[in-house]
Image: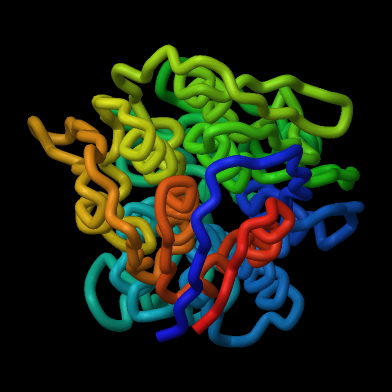
Amino acid sequence: MELLHLSQKSAFDTVNIPLPSSKSESNRVLIIDALTDGKNQISNLAEARDTQTMIRLLQTNPPVFDVLDAGTTMRFLTAFATVTNQNKVMTGTPRMCERPIGILVDALRSIGGEIHYLNKEGYPPLAIHGLNQQSQKQVKIRGDVSSQYISAMLMIAPALPLGLEIELQGKVGSQTYIEMTLQLMRNFGIHYTWEENIISVPPQTYQASSFTVESDWSGASYWFSLLACADSGQIFLKGLKEDSLQGDAAIVEIMDRLGVKSNYKEDGILLQKKAVSGLEKWDFTHCPDLAQTVAVTCAIIGQNSIFTGLESLRIKETDRIFALQQELSKFNAQLKEIEPDVFQVIPSVTMPNEVKIHTYDDHRMAMAFMPLLTKTKVIIEDPDVVNKSYPSFWKHCQLADISTQES
């Protein structure tokens, strides 16, 4: 297995990071663009493998949509292929075929979609045979499993003859991602209403428009964490906006409590050190992709914190709860489940001379543990896993004068 050695470095001068574009925005805009026959002017699409996979599949339109390990690509293209009445096989990596898709398939079937499982019920691979006639416009979807199912249904709603009326059942997780989807749809001329737990989208036509994808707040979070864990320094992150559509912009408020001050500039955000006020508890329901980063930060800087809203982490690229527990223990920290779905970060009190991080085929595990280099030498297993969302991550570490050596 390839290894990446990161030398210990605790202080930084002014570091300028040209962040990658948002994978979340890119993948949504690509589906909307496909539903308007590609008549839009879209710029700054993400370099992430998930997005590049989406672009390739939409452009080449093969009979089998192999999404590799891209969850949003799987969910969004399943809905897209159904509403555009295509015959497709949807598949991906072995791990992708272990990630549930039954809620989305049930929703598509309920409005007339013809979809069959090719192996295990509720999981890819799938055979899609389109949607000849919409049978109804009312759909009920659980809100506590994955917002991607809801976003997938929302984006195809205007193209349906009857539109859609989606009833969100139970607790709604990652609501900010649903709001992002709706705001992007509005950018392309779509009208909708959201009253209590019902989102209504009448039948209508997407309007050609122009859109520039924002820099990625999820990618930004690792640099917030690095500065929080460092003894000194400041970091400028290019391309972030204060009025972001991305829910992971919550990292600003979280890290303000963990010792990082954010100053918005014309072309980005300047991060500077400040006193730690403490993060007693945080609910990650609407920003689950930040959980790994914040857990590692708290463990490193000595913050005992309570985390909730982590339910969706078990069905991500890996079981992220288990992965965090295993890797935090390597430097004597813990993520302890103190009651069902309530976790306590217990920080490290002694730091080994070197820590080797297993990444579990999960890009966020590699990047979330990078800031550990402020306290000790770090070895990252399978460093290329970052290509899923942030291919230039290790090059950007070199911009921060972090020594990286492969073996």
Res 196 → quadrant? top left
Res 119 → quadrant? bottom left
Residue at the far left in the pictured view: 339
In the rendered image, residue 199, in percent from the top left (x then y), is placed at 51, 28
Is residue 162 visible in this depiction of the protein?
no
Quadrant in which the N terminus appears = bottom left
In the rendered image, residue 187, in percent from the top left (x then y), is placed at 79, 35
Q: Is residue 370 left or right of residue 95?
A: right
Viewer-proximal residue among 301 and 239? 301
Is residue 93 placed above or below 71 in the rendered structure? below
- The residue lying at 72 percent from left, 64 percent from top is 47
- The residue lying at 42 percent from left, 53 percent from top is 369
The colour mode here is rainbow
- The residue lying at 84 percent from left, 61 percent from top is 38
- The residue lying at 29 percent from left, 39 percent from top is 310
Number of marks in picture? 0
Is residue 327 placed above or below 183 in the rendered structure? below
Q: Is residue 36 left or right of residue 253?
A: right
In the rendered image, residue 5, in percent from the top left (x then y), is placed at 49, 70
Q: In this view, does 298 lie to the left or right of 180?
A: left
Is residue 331 visible in this depiction of the protein?
yes
Viewer-proximal residue among 367 and 29? 367
Res 126 → quadrant? bottom left
In the rendered image, residue 45, in percent from the top left (x then y), is placed at 77, 57
Viewer-proximal residue among 309 and 260? 260
Viewer-proximal residue among 8 and 336? 8
